Amino acid sequence: MRTFVVVSHTAPLEGDFSLSDLPGGAGRIDILCRCATEAFLLSHGIRKDVRLIFAIRDQLIITLEGAWLRHLNPDERSTAALLRKAISRGAGLGPGEVARSTSGITVRAGGLNDVIAELGEAGRQPYLLEEEGLLLRRAELTPGAAFVLSDHRDFEPEERALLDTCPRLSVGPRSLHGHQCITLVHSELDLREAGWTDG
Amino acid sequence: MRTFVVVSHTAPLEGDFSLSDLPGGAGRIDILCRCATEAFLLSHGIRKDVRLIFAIRDQLIITLEGAWLRHLNPDERSTAALLRKAISRGAGLGPGEVARSTSGITVRAGGLNDVIAELGEAGRQPYLLEEEGLLLRRAELTPGAAFVLSDHRDFEPEERALLDTCPRLSVGPRSLHGHQCITLVHSELDLREAGWTDG
């Protein structure tokens, strides 16, 4: 199981946004759409062994599970429609309540602190993807690793405090978009699992 | 200069399509949008040293030049609007005519044979990105290489004949979307140029 955690600082908490203005009125939810595309989509099918967690504004957690995920297409607009449905289902949930949205997508109240605590309980090491980290290609990764990244904004100080002890990984010398980092993590793990890496 | 050539078998030849149905009525132009995003966009800026060529249905060639490209945002819809404008500008062009669309985007009549011939004249080796190729990480690449890929459809026999002598490159063991291959090519070249690869 590969896990990705994407922290969103601007995505909507209510599902009344237009699908025709994702970067504007929908609070850059286009970023989350591209992360979902890269986390799950192969050329012909879905990566079943992936979990993608969106932690939105420290209030809403949306979890996508590759094993059950349906209706995920490559284009941004249809992915935004899936997320809009999930956000609508999540509005007004109390602590501990979990709502199912479309197949493979659940939503609940909570923040990054909950996500990090749960990774710890599951024995999954969170790695922070950022420019100053150890080069991914050279890094030894623990099995069941989780990869944490932020949207277009830097982590807030309180988020950074939660992630303070996580090992840092960099994908390369250029500063890339989060979804591109997900593509590169998958590729590195694909190559390792297939035994196609040197050494 | 890094060059990518994407062959589209289904994108529209007229700019009258809706931006709200890119995978359907707009003939999977969403694929071209994602290729443009991956070819040019860094986290904070545009890759200036990139040329992206769309060869659409053997009739229209759209060229995007990173050095002059403007108005390219990460979301698919706004990229589709740029391509729609270029397609509209290209409708009715005669052989040899070139039209400028928005900054950094030109359009002309022509097909993959023209693109391949021009790469040859410029001394740029075209590499074909496909699953059966030599692993990109292990491949020695000539300077100024061009990378050719198809959309969601396989190359047609006459396209394949044009590409018959091109070396084949694979990005890894899984079959990925074209835009993901572009991300991986850029990453490999970034790492090599920075001297971050082993050996």
Image (cartoon, coloured by chain):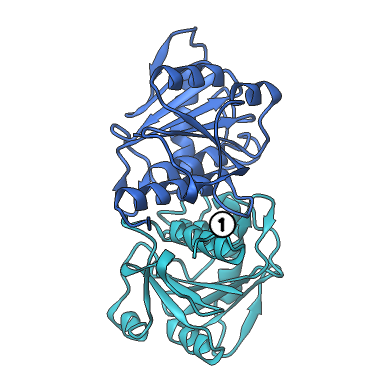
Chain colours: A cyan, B blue
Q: Can residue B29 be seen in this view?
A: yes
Task: Return the residue nearer the eye: A74 or A125.
Answer: A125
**Where does residue B69 sit, x and y in percent of width and height?**
32, 34
Q: In which quarter of the image is the C terminus of chain B?
A: bottom left
**Where does residue A137 sit, x and y in percent of width and height?**
43, 64
Task: Return the residue nearer the eye: A113 or B20.
Answer: A113
Instruction: Bin the neighbour count of mark 1 within 10 Å (Cα to Cα): few under 14, some 14-19, many 20 and up.
Output: many
**Where does residue A108 sit, x and y in percent of width and height?**
57, 81
Q: Is B25 left or right of B3, judged from the image as shown?
A: right
Q: Quadrant of residue A92?
A: bottom right
Q: Quadrant of the N terminus of chain B?
A: top left
Number of numbered callouts drawn: 1
Circle 1 chain: A
The amino acid at mark 1 is Thr
Q: In this view, does A16 lie above or below B41?
A: below
Q: Is residue A39 visible?
A: no
**Where does residue B42 sit, x and y in percent of width and height?**
35, 50
Residue at 50 percent of width and 80 percent of height: A142
Q: In this view, does A136 lie above or below B173?
A: below
Q: Is residue B36 above or below residue B175?
A: above
Q: In which quarter of the image is residue B96?
A: top left
Task: Return the residue nearer the eye: B151 or A194.
Answer: A194
Q: Is B173 left or right of A11, judged from the image as shown?
A: right
Residue at 41 percent of width and 26 percent of height: B124
Q: In which quarter of the image is residue B153?
A: top right
Q: Which residue bears the numbered disc 1? A: A37
Mark 1 secondary-structure assignment:
helix
